[in-house]
Image: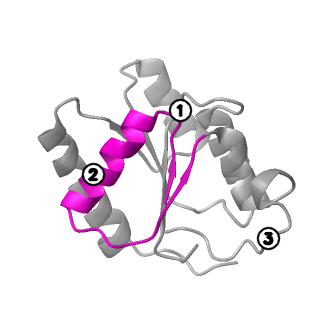
Amino acid sequence: MNNKAILIVEDDPDDIDLIKRALLRNSVVNEVVIVEDGAAALDLFFKKEGRFAGKDSGMLPAVVLLDIKLPKVGGFEVLRRLRAEERTRLLPVVILTSSIEEEDLVNGYRCGANSYVRKPVEFESFVTAMQHLTVYWLLLNEMPPPR
């Protein structure tokens, strides 16, 4: 994974396809890495077991798009663990969810999310939202140096 990659943590194949189509529509050429559950996301960062075990962790992505309703390990727990580790503490994490629950919104920020975005239902609105996300997190945002 390169340092301008986008990590998508999403279990719904339709949402994954929607995100990929929106990125393509916005001419995003950055590497896109997809993991389909919270355990795989943690494994990608910490490589203790699973399909990424023993592999070089490489650079961190430019941004993580994190769903909160995930199998194995939920999105909030993934976020808590990322924030608990020095290496991933400052990693930009955007919660990208269809949840309209105010409690989820508050919980996301309490756990350390940098942003909380509700997935628009209409495709063109989703494309526009992804355009804003990618421009900000991939082009405008400046990351602190790695520790």
Task: Identify the residue at horizontal 70%, vertical 78% (top origin).
Answer: 147
Q: Position of residue 17 (x, y in %)?
A: 36, 44
Of residue 46 and residue 82, the one placed in the foreground of this image is 46
Task: Identify the residue at horizontal 17%, vertical 38% (top origin).
Answer: 123
Task: Identify the residue at horizontal 68%, vertical 36% (top origin).
Answer: 77
Q: Which mark is residue 55?
A: 3
Q: Position of residue 116 (x, y in %)?
A: 40, 40
Relative to 4, is 112 on the left or the right? right
SS for callout 2? helix
Q: Earlier in the sequence, mark 1 or mark 3?
A: 3
SS for callout 3? loop
Please give the residue where the numbered disc 2 appears in the rendered image.
21
Q: Which mark is residue 68?
A: 1
Q: As shown in the figure, which amino acid type bears the numbered disc 3? A: Lys
| Label 1 – label 3 distance at C-alpha | 26 Å
Q: Which residues are the magenta region?
A: 7-36
Q: Earlier in the sequence, mark 2 or mark 1?
A: 2
